[in-house]
Image (tube, rainbow, N blue to C red):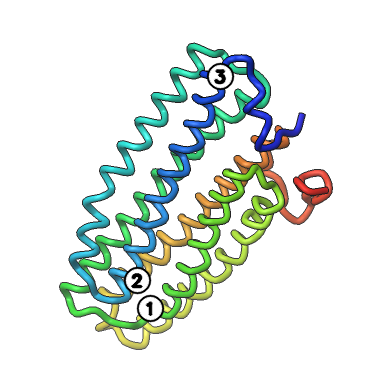
Amino acid sequence: MDITSDTHSQHISNQFNQELEALKTHLMAMGGLVEKQVQDAISALLEGDSRLAEQVRDNDTAVNDMQLKIDEECTRVLARRQPAASDLRLVLAVIRATSDLERIGDEANKIARNALSLAESGRSARGFVEVRHISEHVRGMVRDALTAFARFDTDLALKVVREDEAVDSEYTSAMRSLVTFMMEDPRSITSILSVMWILRALERIGDHADNLAEYVIYLVKGLDIRHSDVDTLDEQELGSKG
């Protein structure tokens, strides 16, 4: 059975309704923090702001703590309520989503660490154009994936899934460009490697956003599309508005 945003407000137990809603609310709060971590890490890099980079690094613990708290809440719901059908899918989707959000936080931390390294060694703008472009793309994916989760919107989720291929293509092109530059100027190898690690972190953030979107489709439709060919997915079957 497909679900909508109203499905989880139909339980006899009002307490159960509140527990399920709390899971979503806390997941969105964690998502908001992770989004800010990514944004701040990129800003720290592009602006050469060491203090902001250190703040991102320090806030990684808060992201980890939020994951543990939400996991504990999910465990209590599973133990006390023994949810079935769409309720069970919601709890499982939240557990999976918090894991991907925590990993996005880890990638933001990696970006911040490399930003600090570049700032200390005399930052180079080589590769920053690519970083800015790809970061805007993946941040949009994360934002849309979280919005899709909040609204149970499979149309938006499917859009995120399909955007991941574009990010992969942009990443490959950027890496080729940087390799060429390193070959032409060996003195740039150290700084370019740092930029490459940042691009890799952004590409991984796109992968985790893709995972978040896939959980939305699983949650709403009960379909696991993790190993499906994106081009063959049936929009009419997966869409939430059709």
- Say which residue label 3 marks: 14
Name the one closer to the observer, 77 or 161. Answer: 77
Secondary structure of the residue carrying numbered label 3: helix
Secondary structure under badge 1?
helix
Instruction: Single out the mark in the foreground, 2 or 3.
Output: 3
User: What is the quadrant of residue 186 in the picture?
Assistant: bottom left
Q: Find residue 41 and report its horizontal and vertical position in percent.
A: 32, 63
The alpha-carbon separation of the residues under discs 2 and 3 comes to 51 Å
Callout 3 amino acid: Asn
Q: Which mark is residue 38?
A: none
Relative to 149, 123 lies left or right: left
Q: Residue at x 51, y 17 (%)?
A: 78
Counting residues from the N terminus, which is met first, the one under dot 1 or under dot 3?
3
- The numbered mark, 1 or 2, whose residue comes first in the sequence reads 1
Q: Which residue is mark 1?
A: 128
Looking at the rendered image, the quarter that the N terminus falls into is top right
Report how far apart the C-alphas of labels 1 and 2 lie in the structure: 8 Å
Count the labels in the image: 3
